[in-house]
Amino acid sequence: MAARCDLLLGPYSTRLTRAAALALADGDRLLWNHGGAGDDVCAMLPGRIVSVLTPAGRYVEPFLRLPGPPAPLWIVAGRGSFGRQVAAGAESAARALGLDVRRSDEPPDGRGEWDLVSAGAFEDDVATVRRALAAAVPPRRVCSVAAGVRDFAVAVPSPEGVYGVAQWFPESAGEVLLGRGEAEFLGAYAG
């Protein structure tokens, strides 16, 4: 990296963004993180990483706060640390809300409403959602990380009503935990 580099634009990958942050650890440079949502990456180098992503462990919080009566929540975590971080965050938030949480790769047997959170690689999420929607008693609601990807609509026979995870929605009502909020940012930089 050039000595005159003051700002590094991070790559799309938690693993690669972590490596980029470690490369900056000894300097006084800034990392613009727009592709590494791992919880640990978002907390690395305080004051020197600007993360525009929600940390992976908080991805599912809006889904869990949807109105309606509570139902048991099945959480399926795919391979890799990203899926585990999303699933762990979902489990923690769900338990804090008093929900009945179960971790299993298979949909529940029996009757009654249930909700599903699927967090893994695209192919794993698609397989999980397809299997769940084909169950004798399909889930009442589904949240899948993969549903935030355009190809999900083609990969799943009936994607209508499946909640996805997306990072950027204008005028979202989320609480700003660090830095400027949307209105303040746009007021300062929108021209």
Image (cartoon, rainbow, N blue to C red):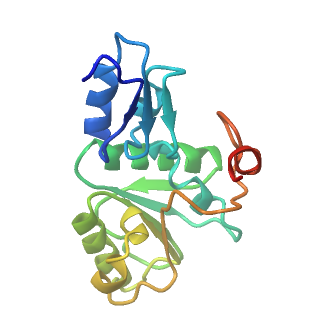
**Residue 37, how many percent across, how many down?**
41, 43
Horizontal side of residue 52 vs 179, given as left or right: left
In the picture as drawn, the residue positioned furthest to the bottom comes out as 157
Please state which of residues 21 and 92 is positioned toward the viewer in this rendering.
Answer: 21
Task: From this view, report whether residue 117 is shown above or below residue 4.
Answer: below
For image coordinates 30% across by 21% down, the residue present is: 22
**Could you tell me how many numbered marks the image carries?**
0
Residue, x 49% and y 50% (percent of image)?
A: 90
Percent across and percent down for residue 176 are 69, 42
In the rendered image, residue 5, in percent from the top left (x then y), is placed at 36, 24
Image: 53 above or below 112: above
Q: Nearer the viewer, residue 21 or 128?
A: 21
Q: Residue furthest top?
A: 26
**Residue 144 figure quarter:** bottom left
Q: Quadrant of the N terminus?
A: top left
Instruction: Answer with the quarter of the image where residue 78 lies.
Output: bottom left
Is 141 placed above or below 26 here?
below
Q: Quadrant of residue 41?
A: top left
Give the side of residue 100 with respect to residue 132, left or right: right
Q: Is residue 159 above or below residue 179?
A: below
Look at 58% across and 67% down and name the residue there.
71
Q: Residue at x 61, y 58 (%)?
A: 62
Looking at the picture, how far across and down is residue 65, in whole percent? 66, 59
